[in-house]
């Protein structure tokens, strides 16, 4: 059982990361970052974990359905700030580049007492981290692929032992004019996709400063613009005219200081602004959405001893949305108060946390989480167990959209129970093995769903959802001489079904949630010899229902995708050059992630990357 390192905790850990040894966490390692440069977060999550991701085109809107929940049941946190949409409650993973963070982790079944509203499925943490021994790291890369797909990136990290600066620029253009078989037209003809272009630019900056007297200052800025043409559905004989532009500005400033090695104080302020423009000339739609979040967080941590630590956290949010469909500017004030404690012994880590959220209408119930991780066999076999309740406050769209918004809608509530076993084996000479087997059971009461009314759709609390599943992960690394092999496999069994309908006219009891596969599997094999490497990735996605009544006619069948990449790295003292050739969907499979939206057949890309690296020895 790893010991608690106080100095590292004080400097780097956000509280929602610090209090979760009892949870299942997947960390992106350096191999995932290096082999999946230029991809979006949604693409990498599907490739590396097998988590269900929905997407209407290669670069289109992407949502996560973690542990059988909806897109608005998983939060995305950027350096501790929730960046989910204020209007829908979900995060579009297609506009989040993997390069946006130095560390990425996924906590499944994340506790509401740590993350707040909307984490029935889990939470994704994107964190910027200083490399204090770095003096200069410069990365340049370009990638060109099928369908006029061009990606360029520049990354600069420079600094010394007291101050570090990170800068990243990303540029992506793709025509996405791929061919596909249109099974919704007579004869299943092969056609070319049209009106599917995308253009995406992002700038990210971070500054970290160690100040005198145990003080620290850090700041981050994220600017991005993405323009996308949305293609017509399969079977259509009219070209789409739908277009969407997303612009975002994210900023935070955090100041922290430490007193007598036992007291830590931090103050963080954040500002998030999202603008979305959607137009459809065919339907004469022209809509603009502007939302802003102002966030303040105050945190105090007391390190009573190496074995016992607790904290107190207070946060405030001012939210506003200027959207024509709301009739007028909508504003809200939200407050949160939370506390947590960690108790560590030689064989056990126990975490306990409480949180209360205050809204203008619906206050949360008292949120709690308690869990432990036990060492059963020294440094080899561990057990995890945790129990927590959950809460989701209705989104702005659900409350204010006109026509149809429901200002009296109730928040979703529920709970989650999880138990797991971990096995770890390490041969100090050349191999490592890690196996995780997790079982979970959760409920969502007063589940919110948009249902048709006489003239429009409206959100209602329509049902109770029960979700249960088993997850198995295996990771194996082996190294001998100049050969390195890394393999991983992830299997997910997910039942997400309606347990009770509140509306007698809607009887979907026992039906699987839409787009949630019961079975999914992902595996990756990475092999390197000297400076050559080969990577093979395969995902298997089970049948998915696309209607609430689980109509078999509209169900999407099982499909399997395989990708392979081959590369070579040349090393010249402090300079390295990497060449990579990748083939996606090597078996030319026709498939749909969202019904009636085509995805590409076999396609290729070539990437070249340069890196200059200078560390302080």
Image (spheres, helix red, strand yellow):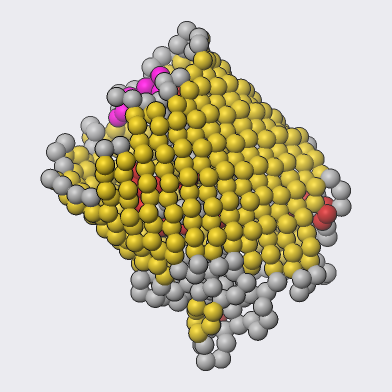
Q: Is 514 located above or below residue 130 in the figure?
A: below
Q: Residue furthest right?
A: 327
**Residue 206 makes an appearance in the image:** yes
Res. 612 image quadrant: top left
Does residue 586 appear left or right of residue 401 in this picture? left
Residue 17 visible in the shown view:
no
Split into 4 quadrants, where in the image is the C terminus?
top left
Decide if residue 392 is on the left or right side of residue 409. Answer: left
Residue 98 placed where, x, y %?
48, 48
Q: Position of residue 99 (x, y in %)?
A: 48, 45
Residue at the spot x=65%, y=46% of the render?
A: 248
In depth, the one of 515 and 35 nearer the eye is: 35
Q: Horizontally, is 610 left or right of 453 in the view? A: left
Question: Where the N terminus falls, by quadrant?
Answer: top left
Q: Is residue 250 magenta?
A: no
Horizontal and vertical percent position of residue 293: 70, 38
Report the residue at 38% width, 17% height from top: 306
Q: Which residues are magenta?
A: 1-10
* Identity of the residue furthest to the top in this view: 260
Name the residue rendered at 45%, 11% in the picture: 261
Q: What residue do we see at 23% from left, 32% from top?
A: 378
Residue 539 location in percent, x, y? 38, 63
Q: Nearer the viewer, residue 170 or 514?
A: 170
| Looking at the image, residue 562 lies above or below residue 470 | below
In this rendering, is residue 127 above or below 12?
A: below
* Residue located farthest toward the bottom when viewing the structure as drawn: 187
Number of dots carrying numbers: 0
Instruction: Please state if 64 lies on the left or on the right of 409 as rendered.
Output: left
In terms of image quadrants, where is residue 308?
Answer: top left
């Amino acid at each position: 059982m790893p010991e608690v390192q106080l100095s590292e905790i004080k400097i780097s850990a956000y509280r929602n990361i610090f209090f979760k040894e009892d949870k299942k966490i997947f960390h992106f390692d350096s191999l995932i970052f290096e082999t999946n440069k230029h991809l979006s977060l949604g693409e990498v999550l599907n490739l590396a974990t097998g988590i269900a991701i929905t997407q209407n085109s290669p670069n289109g809107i992407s949502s996560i359905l973690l542990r059988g929940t909806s897109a608005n049941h998983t939060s995305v946190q950027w350096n501790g700030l929730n960046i989910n949409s204020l209007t829908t409650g979900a995060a579009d993973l297609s506009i989040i580049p993997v390069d946006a963070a130095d560390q990425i982790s996924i906590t499944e079944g994340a506790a509401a007492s740590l993350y707040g509203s909307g984490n029935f499925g889990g939470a994704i943490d994107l964190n910027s981290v200083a490399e204090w021994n770095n003096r200069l790291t410069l990365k340049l890369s370009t990638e060109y692929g099928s369908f006029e797909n061009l990606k360029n990136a520049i990354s600069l990290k420079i600094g010394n032992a007291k101050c570090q600066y990170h800068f990243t620029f990303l540029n992506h253009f793709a025509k996405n004019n791929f061919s596909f078989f249109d099974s919704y037209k007579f004869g299943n003809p092969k056609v070319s996709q049209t009106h599917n272009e995308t253009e995406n630019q992002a700038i990210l900056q971070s500054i970290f400063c160690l100040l005198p007297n145990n003080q620290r200052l850090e700041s981050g800025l994220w600017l991005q613009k993405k323009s996308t043409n949305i293609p017509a559905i399969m079977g259509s004989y009219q070209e789409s005219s739908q277009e969407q532009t997303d612009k975002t500005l994210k900023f935070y400033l955090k100041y922290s200081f430490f007193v007598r090695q036992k007291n830590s104080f931090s103050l963080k302020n954040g500002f998030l602004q999202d603008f979305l423009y959607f137009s459809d000339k065919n339907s004469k739609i022209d809509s603009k959405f502007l939302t802003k979040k102002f966030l303040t967080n105050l945190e105090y941590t007391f390190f009573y001893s190496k074995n016992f630590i607790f904290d107190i956290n207070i946060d405030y949010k001012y939210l506003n949305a200027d959207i024509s469909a709301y009739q007028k500017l909508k504003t809200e004030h939200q407050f949160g108060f939370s506390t947590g404690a960690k108790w560590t012994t030689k064989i056990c880590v126990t975490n306990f946390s409480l949180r209360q959220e205050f809204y203008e209408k619906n206050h949360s119930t008292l949120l709690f989480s308690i869990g432990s991780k036990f060492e059963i066999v020294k440094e080899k076999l561990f057990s995890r167990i945790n129990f927590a309740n959950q809460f989701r406050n209705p989104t702005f769209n659900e409350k204010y959209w006109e026509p149809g918004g429901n200002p009296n809608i109730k928040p979703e509530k529920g709970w989650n129970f999880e138990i797991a076993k971990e096995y770890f084996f390490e041969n100090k000479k050349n191999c490592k093995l890690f196996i995780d087997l997790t079982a979970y059971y959760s409920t969502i009461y007063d589940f919110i769903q948009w249902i048709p009314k006489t003239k429009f759709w409206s959100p209602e609390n329509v049902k109770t959802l029960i979700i249960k599943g088993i997850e198995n992960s295996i990771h194996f690394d082996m190294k001998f001489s100049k050969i390195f092999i890394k393999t991983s496999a992830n299997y997910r069994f997910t039942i997400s079904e309606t347990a009770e309908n509140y509306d007698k006219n809607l009887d979907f009891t026992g039906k699987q949630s839409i787009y949630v596969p019961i079975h999914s599997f992902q595996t990756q094999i990475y092999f390197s010899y000297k400076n050559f490497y080969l990577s093979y990735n395969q995902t298997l996605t089970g049948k998915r229902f696309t209607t609430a009544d689980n109509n078999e006619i509209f169900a999407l069948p099982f499909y399997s995708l395989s990708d392979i990449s081959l590369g070579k790295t040349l090393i010249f003292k402090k300079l390295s050059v990497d060449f990579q050739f990748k083939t996606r969907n090597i078996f030319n499979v026709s498939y749909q992630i969202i019904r009636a939206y085509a995805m590409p057949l076999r396609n290729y890309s070539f990437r070249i990357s340069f890196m200059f690296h200078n560390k302080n020895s």
